[in-house]
Image: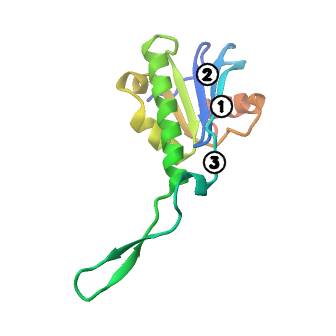
Amino acid sequence: MARAGLQQGSWVLICDGRKALFLENMGDHIYPKLVTRQVVQHKDPPTHDLGSDVPGRVFSGKGGRHSAIEPTDVQSVAEQKFLTAVARRLSREVEEGHVRKLILAAPARSLAVLREKLSAVGRKAVVAEFDKDFVRMPVYEIERHLKRLLSGRS
């Protein structure tokens, strides 16, 4: 994955496990102008609405021993489903020709899910990835950070 500038027409996905910003650069690599194409948020119901938080039990047939089982992290499962849906949408946009170059910025866990769930064609469109959480920043700050990161300065 070669580092490229923020070219005109490049798409940028800023996301975490709860929110995704689909941005398109309408400017050029010197003066980027990110325009919001879509904002997707996943509804975050309380854990008790997602499932039981009581640990399960395992009973051994010999000796009457039993122990607790770690409960499933239902919030993590919900975030993975959200990121899978985001990756499918990105893959579809690339396959339909709407997106040719894609930059991903997300925390490491989210990046891992996106990498795994993006189609082969979608992965080819990715020109840069950053382990950064920009989701709560205004767009003008995201532009500034991406320009700095893409120029090679940390």
Q: CA distance from mark 1 to mark 3?
A: 32 Å
Q: Secondary structure at mark 2?
A: loop
Q: Which mark is residue 24?
A: none
Label ID, residue 6: 2
Q: Nearer the viewer, residue 48 or 69?
A: 48
Within 10 angstroms of label 3, few (less than 14), some, or many (20 or more) residues?
few
Earlier sequence position, callout 2 versus callout 3: 2
The amino acid type of the residue labelled 3 equals Pro
- The residue depicted at 55 percent of the width and 32 percent of the height is 104
> Dot 3: what SS?
loop
Look at mark 3 in the image and give the residue it sits on. 45
Q: What is the C-alpha distance between the residues marked 2 and 1?
A: 8 Å
Q: Residues within 10 Å of mark 2 (few under 14, many from 20)?
A: many
Instruction: Residue 68: give x, y in percent of width and height.
Output: 42, 75
Q: Is residue 135 left or right of residue 124?
A: right
- Residue 146 is labelled as 1
For the point 51% across and 54% down, which residue is it?
74
**Residue 114 drawn above or below residue 96:** below
Pointer 2 with pointer 1, Cβ within 8 A: yes
- Name which residue lies at 51% across and 37% down: 83
- Quadrant where the N terminus sits is top left
